[in-house]
Amino acid sequence: MTPLETADLLTVEFPELCEALHAPQTCTSLYRQLDCFADFTRRAVAGGELDLLRHCFAVADSLLRRADRYLSAAIETAYLHCLHLDGSTYGNQLARQLMPVGLYQAYARSHGNMLP
């Protein structure tokens, strides 16, 4: 999946990200796009918007399932790492309870030494 395809998919799911994802400095970089998406997801956590958070996780899981190696690595190193859920018990509970299984497995692999 190309950066443009990823930006388009995320924009369909989250129209409020359109401007940020299609900005010149972001539209050609999967890592910057996924960092932007992680920031959006963090705001859902901070705002207590659990339905939006669940939707964010579902979209991230969908991306991960259809990912090539490059996109998979970007999701694991940019999106999951930039969520910053690993620093709190609450964050770990959200991950465990709301992430689809595939996304949680990737999260656990990259944060395995930090999970209780």
Image (tube, helix red, strand yellow):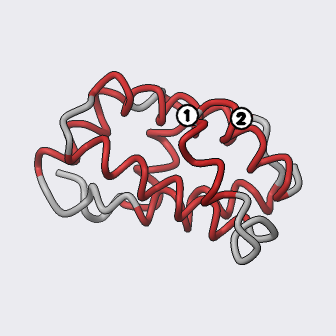
Q: Residue at x 52, y 48 (%)?
A: 106
Tag 2: residue type?
Arg
Q: Residue at x 54, y 42 (%)?
A: 16
Between residues 51 and 75, which one lies in front from this camera angle?
51
Between residues 87 and 113, which one lies in front from this camera angle?
87
How dense is the environment of label 1, judged by Cα within 10 Å: few (below 14), some, or many (20 and up)? some
Left or right: where 41 falls relative to 76: left
Query: How far across and how far down the image is residue 57, in percent?
Result: 47, 35
Between residues 28 and 17, which one lies in front from this camera angle?
17
The image shows a total of numbered marks equal to: 2
> What is the secondary structure assignment of the residue under circle 2?
helix
Between residues 79 and 89, which one lies in front from this camera angle?
79
* Quadrant of residue 59 within the rendered picture: top right
* Quadrant of residue 74 within the rendered picture: bottom right
Q: Residue furthest front?
A: 19
Residue located beneath label 2 in the image: 65
Residue located beneath label 1 in the image: 102
Q: Earlier in the sequence, mark 1 or mark 2?
A: 2
Query: How far across and how far down the image is residue 114, in percent?
Result: 25, 63
> What is the secondary structure assignment of the residue under circle 1?
helix
Label pair 1/2, CB-CB below 8 angstroms: yes
Tag 1: residue type?
Gly
Q: Is residue 26 above or below residue 54?
A: below
* Quadrant of residue 39 within the rendered picture: bottom left
Q: Residue at x 30, y 64 (%)?
A: 113
Q: Residue furthest left?
A: 89
Query: How far across and how far down the image is residue 80, in percent?
Result: 47, 56
Q: Residue furthest bottom?
A: 25
How dense is the environment of label 2, judged by Cα within 10 Å: few (below 14), some, or many (20 and up)? few
Query: How far across and how far down the image is residue 45, in percent?
Result: 25, 43
Left or right: where 46 falls relative to 83: left
